[in-house]
Image: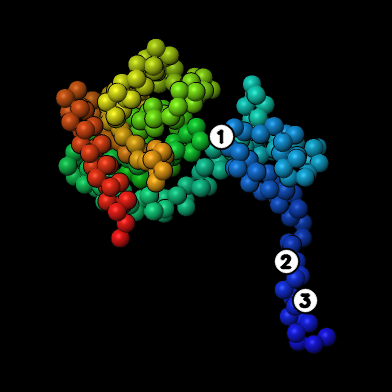
Amino acid sequence: MTNSNREQSHIVSKPVETPGAQNMRRALQILRVLGEHHEQGMAVSEVVAATGLERSTAHRLMTCLVEEHFADRNPLTRRYSLGLEVMRLGFASLSRAPLVATYGGLMRRLARISEDTVFLLVRQGDYTVCLQREDGAFPVKIFSTRVGDIRPLGIGVGGMALLASAGAQDIARIRSQHAPAFDAAGLTSERFGKVVAKTQKQGYAEMVDTVTQGVAGVGATIPDPGGVPFAAISIAAIKPRMTPSRRNELGQMLVQMLNETAQMGNKGP
């Protein structure tokens, strides 16, 4: 065989697969497919069609993924989507994403001006993930939300700002699917509707005594290049500091600063 033939043979040959890792590859294949259809979820039959796996194999692997919280199964629709552990793994890369670099300066500025705690959250399906926090000078810090925490969308003021920006069907679905979490946070159906409507009207969310008693805050959304909100920044403090007038002041300031930052980003270099 000539050198030319050897080079061509090397180019077209398949990469050597690690022995004994077949089940892991199959599970990763399922996770990729679920990720592509995370919003609507997938039935077992759809996963089988997309992956080419035997139904018994796909069902066994998906059951294991659910047990380990890498996948989630809706008991009503029997459809599968990505689980919380996938989001936790993704957090390590998200925290280094351009989003943190872009809004880190603004967060520090907000913490300096307000002297309170500022949070950056990103939407992941029906949940929010806390990517960053900045503590202000006020001695009483807010630790109800820590970097890496995951909550249903709408639980917490930043999440409520994101949820209120979604479509009516999406809002109703999330409220229904996560009803126990909303009820536990004091967001009964009636109060939930009022908070969503108020958020939509004023352009930012404000909440008191939801995630943690005695804590209040405001939050506003960050849009992607297409104008769709995908992240949020919130400011939180103990309730005595967050009077209605101060929530209004901080909420309007937050919206204005986020708009200015977005406009600067759209101008490019």
- Relative to 87, does residue 208 appear above or below in the rendering? above
Residue 5 picture location, percent across and down: 78, 82
Q: Residue at x 41, y 14 (%)?
A: 188
Mark 1 and mark 2 lie on one chain; the one further toward the N terminus is 2
Q: Earlier in the sequence, mark 2 or mark 3?
A: 3
Give the left or right position of residue 219, taking residue 72 as reference. left
Outermost residue, bottom side: 2
Give residue 253's quadrant in the image.
top left
Kindly state the secondary structure of the residue where label 3 is placed.
helix
Q: Residue at x 33, y 25 (%)?
A: 200
Quick check: can you spot residue 181?
no
Name which residue type carries label 1.
Answer: Glu
Residue 253, placed above or below residue 93? above
Q: Which residue is mark 1?
A: 39
Q: Nearer the viewer, residue 34 or 203?
A: 203
Residue 23: x and y in percent read 74, 49
